[in-house]
Image (tube, coloured by chain):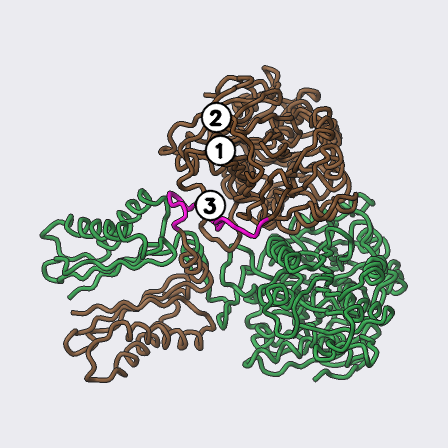
Chain colours: A brown, B green
Amino acid sequence: MVPKKTKRIPRRVTPQPKLNKNDKLRIIPLGGLEEVGRNMIIFEYKQDIIIVDMGLQFPEEDMPGIDYIIPNISYLKGKEKLIKGVIITHGHYDHIGAIPHLIPRLGRPPVFGTPLTLGIIAKRQEDYKNGGKLDLQSVDSESKLRLGVFELEFFGVSHNIPGSLGVIINTPVGKIVHTGDFKLDLHPSGDTPTDLAKIAKLSDQNVLAMLSDSTNAPQPGHQFSEQEIMGNLEDIFRVTEGRLIIGTFASLLGRIQQIVELAEKYGRHIILDGYSMKTNVEIAQQLGYMKIKSNTLISYESMKKLPSNKLVILCTGAQGEGRAVLMRLANREHKKTRITKGDTVVFSSSVVPGNERSVQRLIDTLYREGAEVINYKMMDIHSGGHARQEDLKLMLKLINPQYLIPIEGNHSFLKIHAKIAIEIGFDPKNIFIADNGQIIEFSKQGGRLTSKKVPSEYVMVDGLGVGDVSSVVLRDRKQLAEDGMVVVIATIEGKTGRLIGRPDIISRGFVYMKSSQQLIDQTRNKVKDILKDREPKSSLNETYIKNKLRDDLGKFLFQKTERRPMIMPVIIEV
Amino acid sequence: MVPKKTKRIPRRVTPQPKLNKNDKLRIIPLGGLEEVGRNMIIFEYKQDIIIVDMGLQFPEEDMPGIDYIIPNISYLKGKEKLIKGVIITHGHYDHIGAIPHLIPRLGRPPVFGTPLTLGIIAKRQEDYKNGGKLDLQSVDSESKLRLGVFELEFFGVSHNIPGSLGVIINTPVGKIVHTGDFKLDLHPSGDTPTDLAKIAKLSDQNVLAMLSDSTNAPQPGHQFSEQEIMGNLEDIFRVTEGRLIIGTFASLLGRIQQIVELAEKYGRHIILDGYSMKTNVEIAQQLGYMKIKSNTLISYESMKKLPSNKLVILCTGAQGEGRAVLMRLANREHKKTRITKGDTVVFSSSVVPGNERSVQRLIDTLYREGAEVINYKMMDIHSGGHARQEDLKLMLKLINPQYLIPIEGNHSFLKIHAKIAIEIGFDPKNIFIADNGQIIEFSKQGGRLTSKKVPSEYVMVDGLGVGDVSSVVLRDRKQLAEDGMVVVIATIEGKTGRLIGRPDIISRGFVYMKSSQQLIDQTRNKVKDILKDREPKSSLNETYIKNKLRDDLGKFLFQKTERRPMIMPVIIEV
């Protein structure tokens, strides 16, 4: 499934063109500069394009029904043949999530990443029946790669998933560094530490521009080390007497590795629970990223033979997701076990904004079932995988670029990142805060944030539909959610325009019809009145009647209920 | 509008009955014990009932279209005449918000509170045309009140709105203390400090039970003092050179008072912006709770004559609310001014869970407009109004009750409150963690958490409807929000069951109809097929046909789109 490591892949060589001083490198971020998510950046030089990352963004709360958002690739239409490769910095969904949708539409360029990154990509591809095969090419921090005019090198970074890379892109106009998601953790867990020696060597190599992770730019100080987290987690292992149930992200492989080590140290066995958790661990183990003793992982069946203080259930659902393991445990819907008094449940990941209330409900239910709950508010057992302000300064000093392009974060994060750089003496003129789609140009004369923009509007994925949910559809969903809908069906004699029989009223999400008979009757009468009102001699103007029904009934129902259901008149002409 | 203060109101005296050792005091929390919000507790002794607080709860994210939730008062039906009074501890919506809906249904008992609390209640009542008049009776921390068998005293508490009270209820079976929302702030702003001397005297008065605020029970340590906040805010006033725009809750009158004082100290004038902000300040000023120099408050018109470093705009919208002042400023939709470079926007209230993403979007827009933004993550300029763990312990020691009943918070908060009490030696048997509706009984023999429950289900307010939005309606709204709906209209000849003409398909929130003609046509054909399939000789069974259309079309559309719109078949028989 996962391709073998290959080093030094001198492939797809295009003859090195003569450098014209007007030739420009264009850097075009298609996503990730106005949000956390859907990271994707184009590097284009004449007839060569490479892409770094191809991620998804989780939907905002005003996008009901949307699965996720992917980058808009309109700009690449017609340029598919120029795309020499896609580099994926690491295996998180905000960096890989758009691959199944976009790679087939981009002429299936090869995808480069570390074996773990590729393993996760390959596994996910299985969920997309029509996705086809991917051309996955393995690299590591020692690899060198030529893709068209671009010569690529890599450096390891610690994040919170092993196999994370930063990318050095040697272009005809200069050296560009893309940090990927990183933190500076001298004691990472599972991860390789950020390769400071290699990075520091860049400082005198005239790096033209650095694109640097801004996810945690609003946070002052240094990011916690995973070793500190390990200490906090170890405290829990040391004092807990009953069963330990630890919820975290399936993608936090570093954290999972820590928990495995602690379980082994404290003589506990682990039941892995949750499909994504299991497959990620399996891939990481297969590829040698994760070390687990042979008897550490057990099944629910073996659990019964062991005392509770020898057990850890390591599972998904720490964000309060409805169908994930923790919720099923809390709600007694889990087939293999249930929460009992004496269990300690640990939430070992920070809460994604928007999930706070679901997590709180989950915690309440766990308490009700008799568990002790340790969550991040009580003890810092979560750690971001991203550099904070002091780390960002250090990275900037080490790489010492001429230009800084803050990436990966909301607009305000980029601004704050810039502010930090200015604080340590970076020239404000050489910081480019771009929007999604905004073209940045570099030539031998220097860099420029142009005012040109390529399309970067949301492309929403909903079921099998990609980009087919328009703002109209979303607006309707929101209106339907607020106050429901009323369908009015009137049968009318075509010749006379006379109403036949009683109008039918159907509503959903508006009022409970069974207990609102009076309102329904009044509405029916109102429809009759509206239809009677018509000029008797005018012929049937369906559009006019429908609009009138919509307006007049809307007012009538608002006056009765102060709600604004969507009104859908249906005129049947017989 | 606001009634005058009255002290010692010996009213509604019922003859003191002889105490029977089997007579019981029942404490019934109707809300606030499984959530933060809709606080309302019944105290019932034989023929006398008093109620403390009557609040609303803001809806959860899975309740689209709901305005808010109020307590369920089924238990009080038929007991209206026994209700001797309603005590409101302070003027926040989670304590007063259900008054307009419930007071008219409870025989309009008198409502007691401090003048500020009553002022806010009276002002809000104006929004409810059919709410009628309230019987508002003013009390303060020195008042004594007899309501039926209950003798009431009060003590001042600091929270984050002036005029907050705790209540001492002398009952035939013993003394009950209800803390209200409180923190122990020795340097409050605007507020009176929590009356520790009066509280401490309770310790040797054999308090039977204490009902104590658990809102911040999960937070270790002591709550910040408003004085610390003042220091942080003052730092901002000291260094800011341009215009200051400060967003906060209109109900955080203590914070507003601080900002007024700092503005006056630093020679800035204040423009108050936001309806609720203005009316709250007006009420507080009128009643002497807030001191503002005569030339401090100015209008937008005077703003133009002053340099920006002499200005503060103090406004609502720090939660990212769509139509509030801050959002209108950010979106250039404000009629009087707009954000300009040099403005500093301060978010001076913590973000209510669920609002994080709206707040982030607002911050991004403000940065984009050129403002500097200081939000709570960067500097602690928000402070909860609630006791944290060490404060709770101190309160418990000072009041020294026989029983502890944690109130005001999610189930887990109550459990944590209990755990803290046990840590300092409180007898676990004497802590009652009740659910909403669960009856707690006290007699001369002691207290008991019974297993009896009165109704406490959500009563949802949506427009003019109170309690008419059922779970069915909500479920429909959620389904409509996810994937929209499809109405299928088929005209059928009654006698033959033959389809007449083409079936009509209307959809909203499912796919964009204009660009999905093919799918619509396929759906139409599918409908024809389904209708043809019927046994030719069977008579028209509308229910059967509708169910079949719903099921078969559902499967068909899911297969085509992986979406599950609500399908509504309409059969017109002619």
Q: Amino acid at mark 1?
A: Asp
- Chain bearing mark 1: A
Q: Is residue A462 magenta?
A: yes
Q: Which residue is mark 1?
A: A48
First in sequence: mark 2 vs mark 1: 2
Q: Which residue is mark 2?
A: A14
From the viewer's perspective, is residue B153 above or below residue A39?
below
From the viewer's perspective, is residue A392 above or below residue A261?
below
Foreground residue, B415 or B25? B415
Q: Are marks 2 and 1 in contact (CB under 8 Å)?
A: yes
From the viewer's perspective, is residue A97 above or below residue B435?
above
Circle 2 Cα neighbour tier, 10 Å, few/some/many (<14 / 14–19 / ≥20): some
Q: Amino acid at mark 3?
A: Asn
Q: Which residue is mark 3?
A: A72
Give the quadrant of the N terminus of chain A.
top left
Magenta stretch? A450-468
In the rendered image, residue A523, in percent from the top left (x then y), is placed at 34, 75
